[in-house]
């Protein structure tokens, strides 16, 4: 089964009793005991069929043996990491990861007696250099936010495999449509399903996929941590996933057009998009990604007031946090994802007050470009 068919059909199931072709919402926290399935059915045990539907879909799209859905991306990430590391063990994390993940690594892991080393670069050697006798896992996020730098997934996976170290990637920005890390040897893939997987900016959810054995292990920890996804959101996630390939292909196409427009626009200082030949990771992107994604970041000429005027003059593109929805949104990383950094730290990581990150939606690209051109003209 190919991707579009998988997205529509896998996991979802008809309600045969009532003859409806969609997955029913089983809104029940109390189930018969013993249950006809032989399982103990309970929402926190993540075994309500409405919850399993999107989990199976995501697993199949990632070419994984099994998957689970959570109440947020952070629930998926924290549960997955905590399922595999013990007190006294060591982990390696890319330092430019999602802010919530970074806070978890730097604030919560030390309290559990788990040591974490941060890697401020994207080079495989820098990760390898940090490996110690007691290193248990390596965690990466590629493409990164907001400058879309890439880590060589295959190299990281190989280095980890050779040493029996677990590898995890946050695949939120790429989605399984653009990047399949398990095929490159990564052990586990985590997602903020709040973004592209659901795709309609209306629920929070998360996911992890891997082989059956690792998912069973994560499930045990998940029962105790309690980050299960409620059935109404599970239903919406399953519905959103049906159009994931369509949406992502359109977003790839739109983002490429916008990046090429911005590259030649006279009000632009610099554009960051892995699909552009000038991006530092362009050739790696060609090697490990099937599409370059829906996020485009750029630096505007001028200063903050110019950039503010620009964002306030837009009609279609909304200034909003989060990303990955059908609608185009944009934000200033200096006041959102990178707000905790000092100006110096921020600028050292390439984020200025005129840096704007756009999450490109599925609208007509001509309208989005015209919206930007008009707004730039009036700023
Ligand atoms: C949003 C995001 C998360 C966190 O997900 P939530 O659903 O907000 O908990 C993790 N990783 C990345 C890359 C994200 O963009």
Image (spheres, grey):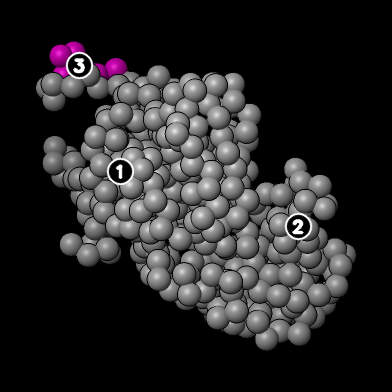
| Residue ID for mark 2 | 348
Return the x and y of residue 203 as percentages of the image width and height.
49, 43
From this view, report whether residue 29 is shown above or below residue 229: above
For the residues labelled 2 and 3, the Cα–Cα distance comes to 58 Å
Q: Position of residue 302 (x, y in %)?
A: 85, 72
Q: Residue at x 55, y 52 (%)?
A: 126
Task: Give the residue at mark 1.
Answer: 210
Alpha-carbon distance for marks 1 and 2? 35 Å
SS of the residue under disc 3: loop
- In this picture, residue 14 sits left or right of residue 199: left
Question: 122 or 172: nearer the eye?
Answer: 122
Tell me what residue is drawn at x 26 percent, y 54 percent: 63
Which of the two discs, 2 and 3, labels the residue nearer the N terminus? 3
Mark 1 vs mark 2: which is more N-terminal?
A: 1
Mark 3 touching mark 1, by CB under 8 A? no
User: Which segment did they paint magenta?
Assistant: 30-35
Query: What is the quadrant of the N terminus in the image?
Result: bottom left
Question: Which of the 4 quarters of the picture holds residue 289?
Answer: bottom left
Classify 10 Å Cα crowding around label 3: few (below 14), some (14-19), many (20 and above).
few
Whole-number angstrom distance, CA of label 3 to CA of label 1:
31 Å
Asked which secondary structure carries label 2, the reply is helix
Q: Earlier in the sequence, mark 3 or mark 1?
A: 3
Instruction: Confirm or reject: label 1 Cβ below 8 Å from ligand 1.
Output: no
Looking at the picture, how far across and down is residue 291, in whole percent?
42, 70
Residue 32 shows which numbered tag? 3
Q: Residue furthest top?
A: 33
Please determine whether, in this image, residue 168 is positioned above or below residue 217: below
Residue 324 seen in the figure: no
Q: Quadrant of residue 372?
A: bottom right
Q: Is residue 101 visible?
A: yes
Disc 2: CA contacts within 10 A as few (<14), some (14-19) or many (>=20): few
Q: Is mark 2 within 8 Å of ligand 1?
A: no
């Amino acid at each position: 089964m190919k991707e579009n068919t998988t997205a529509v059909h896998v996991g979802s199931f008809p309600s045969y009793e009532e003859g409806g072709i969609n997955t029913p919402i089983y809104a029940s926290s109390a189930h018969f005991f013993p249950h006809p399935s032989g399982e103990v059915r309970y929402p926190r045990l993540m075994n309500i069929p409405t919850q399993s539907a999107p989990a199976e879909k995501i697993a199949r799209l990632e070419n994984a043996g099994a998957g689970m859905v959570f109440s947020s991306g952070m629930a998926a990430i924290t549960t997955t990491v905590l399922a595999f590391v013990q007190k006294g063990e060591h982990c390696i994390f890319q330092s430019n990861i999602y802010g919530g993940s970074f806070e978890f690594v730097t604030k919560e892991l030390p309290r559990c007696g788990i040591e974490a080393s941060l890697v401020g670069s994207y080079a495989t050697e820098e990760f390898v250099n940090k490996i110690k006798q007691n290193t248990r896992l390596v965690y990466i996020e590629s493409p990164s936010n907001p400058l879309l730098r890439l880590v060589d997934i295959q190299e990281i996976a190989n280095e980890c495999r050779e040493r029996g170290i677990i590898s995890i990637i946050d695949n939120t920005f790429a989605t399984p449509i653009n990047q399949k890390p398990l095929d490159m040897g990564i052990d586990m893939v985590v997602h903020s399903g709040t973004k592209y997987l659901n795709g309609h900016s209306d629920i929070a959810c998360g996911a992890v996929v891997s082989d059956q054995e690792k998912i069973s292990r994560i499930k045990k920890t998940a029962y105790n941590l309690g980050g299960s996804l409620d059935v109404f959101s599970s239903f919406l996630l399953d519905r959103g996933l049906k159009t994931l390939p369509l949406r992502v292909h359109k977003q790839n196409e739109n983002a490429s057009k916008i990046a090429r427009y911005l590259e030649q626009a006279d009000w632009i200082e610099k554009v960051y998009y892995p699909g552009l030949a000038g991006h530092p990771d362009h050739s790696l992107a060609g090697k490990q990604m099937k599409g370059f994604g829906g996020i485009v970041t750029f630096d505007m000429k001028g200063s903050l007031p110019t950039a503010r005027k620009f964002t306030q003059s837009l009609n279609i593109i909304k200034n909003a946090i989060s990303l990955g929805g059908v609608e185009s949104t944009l934000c200033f990383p200096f006041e959102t994802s990178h707000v905790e950094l000092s100006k110096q730290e921020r600028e050292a990581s390439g984020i200025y007050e005129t840096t704007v990150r756009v999450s490109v939606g599925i609208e007509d690209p001509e309208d989005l470009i015209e919206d930007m051109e008009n707004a730039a003209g009036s700023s």
